[in-house]
Image (tube, grey):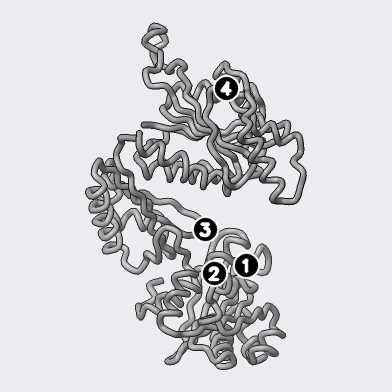
Amino acid sequence: MNAIILSIGDELVLGQTLDTNSAWLSQQLAGIGCDVAAHRTVADDRAAIAEAIREEAARCDVLLISGGLGPTDDDLTREALADVLGQPLTLRSEWVDELQRFFTRLGRTMPERNKVQAMLPEQADLIWNNNGTAPGIRVKWSGVRREEDSSASQASRLNPQPCMIFAVPGVPKEMKPMFADAIKPWLSDRSGGAVILQKTLHTFGVGESTIAERLGELMKRGRNPSVGTTVSHGVVSLRVNARFESPARAHEEMEQTVKACRTVLGDLIYGEDGDSLSQRVAELLTASGKTVATAESCTGGLLAGSLTDLAGSSRFFRYGWVVYSDEAKHKLLDVSQATLAAHGTVSEQVVRELADHARRVAGADYAVAISGIAGPGGGSQQKPVGTVWFAMSYDGGTAAQRFLFSGDREMIRDRSVKMALTMLRYHLLGKRFPF
């Protein structure tokens, strides 16, 4: 079984909103052995939507349409689908009743305009929406299968297995439960395909080419499970996909490949799937009963924020200082004016003093200090933009290291936070910092 995902909306075409629905749906479909052949995005135009439905339904078993089911004039998926099917839209009284109940619960009168959401193609099935006002739609389309050979007869081009079309709301909090509760079970019973398992492993600190070189044959094209890489915000992630007829075989092969990747890359891998670097550090701090403080200059509190964004951070996070100016470094964390004058704000000596004093004042087990030049100005030949000094103070000493990051201000600050977390992570693991 193969599928195509069709997303509807001017905001998607114009790039004003990121299409996260298609990515999520693709992952869900892969998990039940349904191959996703393509994603397509169309503006809020009735004729364009109808054309896209005809074209895509003609070359897939399942067409998933996301968006265009709202109550406004630019929500045109219902009308376009009815045009393709050659069916009139009919009012579903059961959904009108549900809309009345929905607005009554809110203490409001139902706008007359919302009744349009109860209009569905005559032969379509209504999919209940427990989280909003737009029901989903399920309908079978017995159209013409597109063939590469234009000389093929009309009879040979008829689709022997009609395409099943599903239309769901574009709002993720409505779309996801609707798919999980009503559409995924329906497809799972009929997919008859291989089981596809997916896992993502995250690394930070080395480049994509280095990762690929180390993994070698594990990334060979055509391998099953396959191993590929993606890069986002300095994090190189390994995508492991296992496709087998047997679920047990898929799990076994997946685990063997993940184990092989971990054997090669070791502690470079900091987490899986939804894990973040800050989450992993928080888990290590919590497990060890240790606490941390931060002293930041160029990152302006981003490091502290990455840790305190996490629930339960009060167990391990003590203090956080943003000491952007020399005056703040001296007054708040007792960095000597002689050190600042002799070595400058961005220096090993300054971050060492920041970390040492922060740990002492906070009474923390660890303190991490950052000072750098994030740009776009402020650099020099000796200290170019992207120069960042880090120090970590702990019971036993203070370690300091310099890095030179490329990119714009946002990238330099982001990489600085991740590198500081990585330094702390390796120390908590009791491992040598490899960079």
Image coordinates of residue 329 in percent, x first then y, are 66, 85
Q: Is residue 400 left or right of residue 266?
A: right
- Residue 55 in percent (x, y) is at 51, 22
Residue 416 badge: 2
Which sits earlier in the primary sequence, circle 1 or circle 4? 4
**CA gap, disc 3 and disc 4:** 48 Å
- Element type at mark 2: helix
**Residue 211 spot, x, y in % from top left:** 36, 57
The residue sitting at 42% across, 58% down in the picture is 273
Above or below for 163 versus 135? above
Q: CA distance from mark 2 to mark 3?
A: 11 Å
The reply to whether dot 1 and dot 2 touch (C-beta < 8 Å) is yes
Q: Earlier in the sequence, mark 1 or mark 2?
A: 1
Q: Are marks 2 and 3 in contact (CB under 8 Å)?
A: no
Q: Nearer the viewer, mark 3 or mark 4?
A: 4
Amino acid tagged 3: His
Disc 4 marks which amino acid?
Glu
Towards the viewer: 110 or 152: 110
Label 3 close to label 4 by CB (< 8 Å) = no
Residue identified by numbered label 3: 233
Residue 146 place in picture, x, y as percent:
43, 18
- Find residue 425 and report its image quarter: bottom left
Residue 374 badge: 1
Q: Would residue 40 be seen by someone viewing this image from the given angle? A: no
Q: Earlier in the sequence, mark 2 or mark 3?
A: 3
User: Mark 4 or mark 2, which is nearer the start of the sequence?
Assistant: 4
Residue type at tag 2: Ser
Distance from the alpha carbon under mark 2 to that under mark 4: 58 Å
Give the alpha-carbon distance from disc 1 to disc 4, as whole Å.
60 Å
Q: Is residue 315 visible?
A: yes
Q: Mark 1 Cα within 10 Å, few/some/many (few <14, many 20+)?
A: many
Residue labelled with disc 4: 122
